[in-house]
């Protein structure tokens, strides 16, 4: 009876730990690229667009899906409150540490509701769905994912409300993982975990543990994902920071290349040469270039950047 109440009492599911480790490795790759962008080794804005933006959202969604599955495995039909409280306290402490660290490192784009903040809140909210019908949980998950596509509420643009996800334009942050749409991944994970448990798939996956011995190191990493998450970015950030003092990036060359690439989409080569040179000179004169390249410009800074860009555009057309 105790095993039925707590499926996890019968042992860990190694493949889920391995999946969590793979997500951590993917996150480290993304963060390393972000660090290169922050120190101007690659074009500004690289990690916020195209492939890298999709990659980041996929990583966050996979983590949160596994949070949902893990809630089912850890608590089954009976919530073990003491274990839940300890784990929640660890995640909350980690989230606060990220907020404080990024407040000092990048004050204009600090993390006020990142992946750990989301996991903490989603873990609490997810408890309410552990014993609801699977179809209802899955439907709620789909609705949470879809709803932001139909909502654009400017009143939710501030840091006090952007964590909900109903914003028109989100405030600047190095890691914003709002409830809508990302809590949908947690709910879908809960539904998937419930179905897997009810149909014997969890027990079948547990039987694979011995055959996955070659990936044991990944399994260990997956079981310690929180501490790896907290340590990997400071280490990577520090290494890139050290590298920037030994082999400094050519910020001007990176800026010119990115500016020219964007400008050439609509303008001639001669115009873009004048425009980008003007923009660089005026941004440097007002101390904005470094903040812009580090993706840490405040809303006021960005307003001034747009004003300078507009004036350079007019001057370059003469």
Image (cartoon, rainbow, N blue to C red):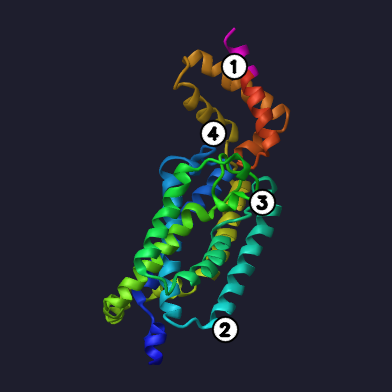
Residue 174 position within the rendered picture, expressed as x and y whole percent measured from the top left: 58, 49
Which residue does the numbered mark 3 point to in the structure image? 160
Q: At x 56% / y 59%, what residue is drawn?
A: 233
Residue 72 in the image, given as x and y percentages of width and height: 42, 75
Residue 102 coordinates in the image, percent (x, y)? 65, 54
In this view of the protein, can residue 148 be seen by the observer?
A: yes
What residue do we see at 39% from left, 55% from top? 142
- Report how far apart the C-alphas of labels 4 and 1 lie in the structure: 20 Å
Of labels 1 and 2, the one closer to you = 2
Q: Which mark is residue 82?
A: 2
The location of residue 262, given as percent across then percent down, is 49, 26
* Label pair 3/4, CB-CB below 8 angstroms: no
Q: Residues within 10 Å of mark 2 (few under 14, many from 20)?
A: few
Q: Which residue is mark 1?
A: 313
Query: Which is more N-terminal, label 3 or label 2?
Result: 2
Does dot 2 land on a helix, a strand or a loop?
helix
Task: Calculate the distance from the C-alpha at mark 2 to the C-alpha at mark 3.
Answer: 30 Å
Q: CA distance from mark 3 to mark 4?
A: 35 Å
Quadrant in which residue 167 is drawn: top right
Give the alpha-carbon distance from disc 1 to disc 2, as whole Å.
62 Å
* Of the two numbered discs 4 and 1 in the rendering, the one whose residue sits closer to the viewer: 1
């Amino acid at each position: 009876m105790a095993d039925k109440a707590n499926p996890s009492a019968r042992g860990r599911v190694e493949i889920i730990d391995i999946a969590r480790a793979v997500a951590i490795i993917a996150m480290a790759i993304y963060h390393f690229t972000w660090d290169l962008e922050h120190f101007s080794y690659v074009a500004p804005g690289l990690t916020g667009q195209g492939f890298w933006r999709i990659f980041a959202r996929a990583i966050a969604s996979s983590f949160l899906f596994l949070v949902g599955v893990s809630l089912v495995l850890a608590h089954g039909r009976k919530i073990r409150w003491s274990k839940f409280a300890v784990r929640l306290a660890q995640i909350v402490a980690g989230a606060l540490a990220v907020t404080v660290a990024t407040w000092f490192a990048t004050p204009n784009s600090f993390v006020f509701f990142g992946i750990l903040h989301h996991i903490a809140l989603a873990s609490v909210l997810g408890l309410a769905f552990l014993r609801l019908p699977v179809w209802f949980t899955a439907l709620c998950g789909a609705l949470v994912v879809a709803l932001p596509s139909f909502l654009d509420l400017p009143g939710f643009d501030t840091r006090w409300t952007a964590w909900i996800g109903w914003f028109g334009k989100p405030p600047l942050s190095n890691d914003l993982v709002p409830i809508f749409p990302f809590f949908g991944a947690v709910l879908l994970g809960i539904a998937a975990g419930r179905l897997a448990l009810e149909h014997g798939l969890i027990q079948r996956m547990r039987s694979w543990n011995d055959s996955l011995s070659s990936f044991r190191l990944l399994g260990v990493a997956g079981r310690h994902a929180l501490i790896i998450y907290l340590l990997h970015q400071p280490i990577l950030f520090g290494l890139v920071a050290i590298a920037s003092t030994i082999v400094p990036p050519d910020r001007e060359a990176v800026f010119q290349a990115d500016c020219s690439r964007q400008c050439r989409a609509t303008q001639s080569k001669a115009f873009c040469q004048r425009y980008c040179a003007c923009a660089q000179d005026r941004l440097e004169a007002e101390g904005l270039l470094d903040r812009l390249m580090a993706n840490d410009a405040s809303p006021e800074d960005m307003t001034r950047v747009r004003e300078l860009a507009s004036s350079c555009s007019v001057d370059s057309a003469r």
